[in-house]
Amino acid sequence: MAVAWMMLSESVLRGILKEKKNNIKHQILISGGSLPAYWLANYIADIIFHSLAASMAVLGTIVFNVGSVGIYNLFLLIVFANPLFIYALSFLFSSEESGSFALNIIFFIWGIVTPIFLSVL
């Protein structure tokens, strides 16, 4: 699951950083669009994008009977929180490569190293 969310988040982050490099937001503002409408539209699109992945994950937990208490709430929360995390992280980077590398390290540590560390403890 960590690798799947990492790849999903990386594609969203790359899109944001590519937009920042090509300055598409500025073109939308010049055309008469508003900044809140731009960010709200991006957020709604990313929620839909994450919802598709979360629904596949929920379906996988049902099919393989690996669900636990609160797993559905966790997927619901990540659908709304992960895009905001990616937006905040995108302000720290200007190139797609450096942002993608940092995001991969964060998801690797949170999703793979930390659960192993906690199970050993």
Image: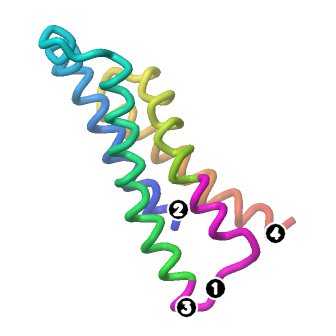
Amino acid carrying label 3: it is Phe
* Snapshot quadrant of residue 74: bottom right
Does the segment drawn in magenta span residue 110?
no
Query: For the residues carrying marks 1 and 2, which lies nearer the camera in this image?
Result: 1
Q: Which residues are magenta?
A: 62-77
Q: Report the disc number at residue 66.
A: 1
Whether residue 117 is situated above or below residue 81 in the rendered picture: below
Residue under pointer 3: 64
Mark 1 residue type: Val
- What numbered label is drawn on residue 120? 4
Looking at the image, tell me whether mark 1 or mark 2 is earlier in sequence order. Answer: 2
Pointers 3 and 1 in contact (C-beta within 8 Å) = yes
Where residue 6 appears, x then y in whole percent?
Answer: 45, 54
First in sequence: mark 2 or mark 3? 2
Query: Which numbered disc flags the more N-terminal residue, 4 or 2?
Result: 2
Q: Which type of secondary structure does the marked residue at label 2 adopt?
A: helix
C-alpha span from label 3 to label 4 = 25 Å
- Identity of the residue drawn at 66% across and 70% down: 71
Q: Secondary structure at mark 1?
A: loop
The label nearer to you, 2 versus 3, is 3
- Residue toward you, 10 or 102: 10
User: What residue is shown with label 2?
Assistant: 2
Which of the 4 quarters of the picture holds residue 64?
A: bottom right
| Real-space CA distance between mark 4 and mark 1, rounded to the nearest whole angstrom | 21 Å
The Cα–Cα distance between marks 2 and 3, rounded to whole angstroms, is 17 Å
The amino acid type found where label 4 is placed reads Val
Contact (CB < 8 A) between labels 3 and 4? Answer: no
